[in-house]
Amino acid sequence: MKAYAANLGYALTSDAKIGTLYTYTDTKNVEVSYTGLYASYSFNGALKGLSLIAQYEDLGKDKDGNEFRIKGSYKF
């Protein structure tokens, strides 16, 4: 198996971040690459502990497709 990953992120503020990522894997002659963009935000005040992330991924090489996700998490 061969795998490579690169992630470039930038903090707009201490709570808001944006970035891009690239991942390549080659497993048993199946090549898959992911190119993605993401943005995240961590809330303060009454919503402290709540985080949201929006992520878009484009799959390439031997698999094709696009995905858009919104994830939320809460730390108690």
Image (tube, helix red, strand yellow):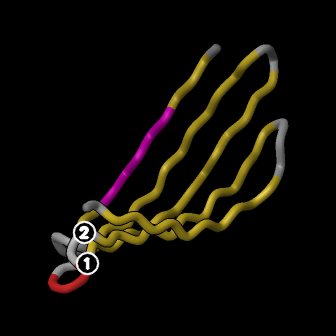
Q: Which of the two discs, 1 and 2, labels the residue nearer the N terminus?
A: 1
Tell me the residue at 31%/72% (across/down). 50
Q: Position of residue 62 (x, y in %)?
A: 84, 36
Q: Could you tell me which residue is drawn at 45 percent across and 68 percent down?
A: 72
On screen, residue 3 above or below 60: above
Q: Which mark is residue 59?
A: none
Q: Residue at x 33, y 57 (%)?
A: 9
Picture quadrant where residue 52 is located: bottom left
> Considering only vertical position in the picture, is 3 above or below 73?
above
Is 13 left, or right, of 30 in this rendering?
A: left
Q: Nearer the viewer, residue 31 or 46?
A: 46
Observer-side mark, 1 or 2, equals 2
- Image: 26 above or below 34: above
Q: Secondary structure at mark 2?
A: loop
What secondary structure is marked by label 1? Answer: loop
Type of the residue with mark 1: Phe
Proximity of marks 1 and 2: CB atoms separated by less than 8 Å:
yes
Query: Splitting the image into 4 quarters, where does residue 25 fall?
Result: top right
Which numbered circle lies on residue 49? 2
Residue beneath label 1, please?
43
Q: Is residue 31 left or right of residue 16?
A: right
Characterize the local packing of mark 2: few (<14), some (14-19) or many (20 or more) Cα atoms within 10 angstroms.
few
Residue 72 lies in the magenta-colored region:
no
Name the quarter where the C terminus is drawn: bottom left
Q: Main secondary structure of the magenta part?
A: strand
In the picture, measured across the screen, residue 47 lies left or right of residue 57, that is left
Magenta extent: 5-9
